[in-house]
Amino acid sequence: MTTLLWTLMVLLLIFVGLCLYRAAYGPTVADRMVAINVISTKTVVMVVGVSIASGQLHYVDVALVYGLIGFLATVGVAAYLDRLGPGGAGD
Amino acid sequence: MTEARQVIAGVLLCLGTFFFFTGTLGVLRMPDVYTRLHVAAKADSLGAGLWMLGLALLSGSGVIGFKLIVLTVFIWITGPTVAHCMARVAYRSKVPMLEGTLQEVDVRISEAEGGDGVQ
């Protein structure tokens, strides 16, 4: 069972790499933010996966805090871009 | 009993990974910001939910299961909020839509010319 868990987490890591392409080359700032948000969700899931697979169950709290920080960061950047006015989230 | 629980957890994890794959494909291949956001928000919520459910079954501990359910509910609340924030920012800062998207202005002009609002 642990083997399947590690294999699926390696797959998730590959998906994170694919999303990084959009984060690096995304034509607009909004594209990059979408990609970073997807990566953030996958990271939360992977932290919980590592916690269960390795038996270090207190890592689940780390995932909770990471999810909270990721949400705050994305909303903060969105509010900042909104304040920049038209074209803020453009190229 | 433990065997059946592990099989169910494995199926849930594989399904979750499939939805994460769909989301990644959408983020890479969709043509503009709004469609990418549309795919990413939905696929991520479902993928994270299925993964958390599978991991909660796998952990077999009540406290950890409760924490994972709290985390799932948190992701399900924040995901749509973030998607709304980003779509609003993109629309207000006039990020261009896909070529041929029907704009609000086009609909108003069409109605003023006596049409039914759809071109």
Image (cartoon, rainbow, N blue to C red):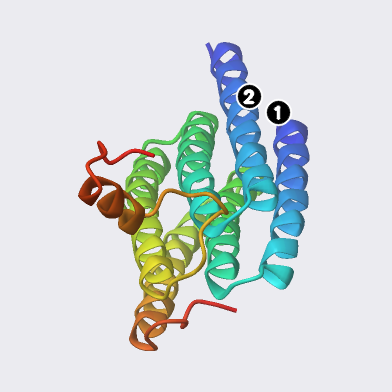
Image marks 2 and 1: residues in contact by CB distance under 8 Å: yes
Q: Outermost residue, front direction?
A: B113
Relative side of A54 to A76, left or right: right
| Residue A1: assigned label | 1
Q: CA distance from mark 2 to mark 1?
A: 8 Å
Relative side of A49 to B54, left or right: right
Residue at x 58% of width, y 33% of height = B16
Dot 2: few (<14), some (14–19), or many (≥20) neighbours within 10 Å? many
Residue at x 32% of width, y 45% of height = B73
Q: Total marks drawn? A: 2
Relative side of B107 to B24, left or right: left
Image quadrant where one finds the C terminus of chain B: top left
Which chain is disc 2 placed on?
B
Q: On the image, which quarter does residue A24 sit in?
A: bottom right
Secondary element under disc 1, as helix, strand or loop, is loop
Dot 1: few (<14), some (14–19), or many (≥20) neighbours within 10 Å? few
Which chain is disc 1 placed on?
A
The picture places residue B106, in percent across and down from the top left corner, at 35, 53
The picture places residue A34, in percent across and down from the top left corner, at 54, 62
Secondary element under disc 2, as helix, strand or loop, is helix
The picture places residue A5, in percent across and down from the top left corner, at 70, 37
Name the foreground residue: B44 vs A7.
B44
| Residue B10: assigned label | 2
Q: What kind of residue is marked 1?
A: Met
Whether A35 is drawn above or below B26: the answer is below
Q: On the image, which quarter does residue B83 sit in?
A: bottom left
